[in-house]
Image (tube, grey):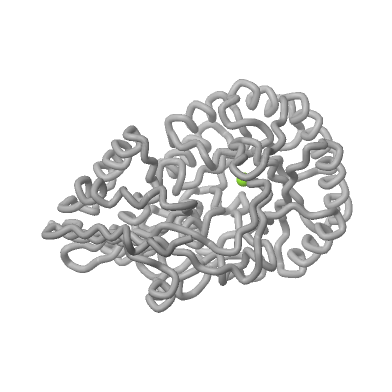
Amino acid sequence: MQVIDGIELYHVTAPLPAPFSPSWIPGTVRNTVTFYLVRFITDDGVEGWSGFTGAGRERVGIGHTLADLFLGESPEDIDRLAERIHIMAVGGNFNWWLEPAFWDIKAKNAGLPLYKLLGGSSDRLRLYASSGELRDTGARREEAEARLADGFDTMKIRVHDWDEKVDIEHITDVATHMQGRMKISVDCNQAFRLTAKADAPLWSLDRAKRFADAAADVELAWVEEPLFGEWHEEMAKLTAYSRVPIAGGELHVMGYAELARMIKMRCYNIYQPDAMFTGGVKQSLDVAKLCREEGVKFSSHTWTNGFGFIINAHVFAASGFADEMVFEYPLNEPGWVPEGRDAIIKQPFMHDKGWFNMPQTPGLGFEIDHEQLKKYGKCFFKASRKEVHWMPEALASMT
Ligand SMILES: [Mg+2]
């Protein structure tokens, strides 16, 4: 039986071509893309990779637990491995991002791109351009025109102002300007308040209703995360009230169990799990299946980095929703562009006039650029069934 014989963990910090200020983390300017990278290696040399967004050194200590839980295990037995990830989560350490690396191995073993192994047949995904920064209306009009010229027929814009009038003016202006040429949606990023650097507005149900009314008046395609993520009852009220579809679901770290309850409660019209946060590939597909059964929609969230994008692309391509929904393509010039977003991946995931052509190589379908990894990454943990090395000093120079 094939077993996991090696684990390596890296911390990667690669430069962005220009600063990027995510709307959902007020007060933040990013000059780099930062993530943890894992490589699982089987005894017969098959590699499974995944990469998860990082802040500081919060995952530097997880190596020994990974070695205890995964070395010597079959990479094909994903239910068992997912149970191990759940054990880590109960212990306070959510690491659903590891699960796709096992699928990478399983699909490589099968000689298939992952989405095909999962039964998917959608080789080409219709994308929507997902912006990431706040802009004034003039700059947003220009951005929407640029994305339309790129070939996108849908774009998601961002709002995060203290004054609801500013938010409403913003969507009204851009949607009216693009009317009939491009669909506009909006992400309010209210489900999880990232107030680490500066405070952020917190919408009430009444504010969300007024916003949904304004969004419906200008025919937005959907409104994303207009309420705090734990307010399930309020969400269900808003969704029942709204004339525009309400979407969300990217950060419900309890995974399928929580999202299934939310689906049954009709918290949203469109569910957007992210395999990296909400239970891995398997649970995301279970969510898609339940969405179909319950008559609601599904489209994966992808915004973390190139790994998050491609892993969720495989899920979406196998979800059964790829012919009726658009899929998130994070793009915010000049800082958040494929070359920076997909750091250390040999061929960044470019769009093709607003479409994404699924990779056809076995597994997740990317190659690590080892030169770039050497340049921007530091290996801080390495283990095999024979020996374990923990090198926290590798990160001593980390800023
Ligand atoms: Mg979102």
Q: Is 129 situated left or right of 47 in this image?
A: right
Image point 48% across, 64% down: which residue? 13
Image point 39% across, 45% down: which residue? 96
Closer to the camera in the image, 288 or 349: 349
Image point 82% across, 37% down: which residue? 163
Res 383 seen here: yes
Q: Position of residue 97 (x, y in %)?
A: 40, 50
Relative height, residue 42 to residue 368 (above, below): above
Q: Position of residue 378 (x, y in %)?
A: 37, 66
| Residue 130 position by quadrant | bottom right
| Residue 240 position by quadrant | top right
Q: Position of residue 162 (x, y in %)?
A: 78, 37
Res 107 seen here: no
Where the N terminus falls, by quadrant?
A: bottom left
Relative height, residue 247 to residue 148 (above, below): above
Q: Quadrant of ligand 1?
A: top right
Image point 24% across, 63% down: which residue? 41
Q: Position of residue 211 (x, y in %)?
A: 79, 34
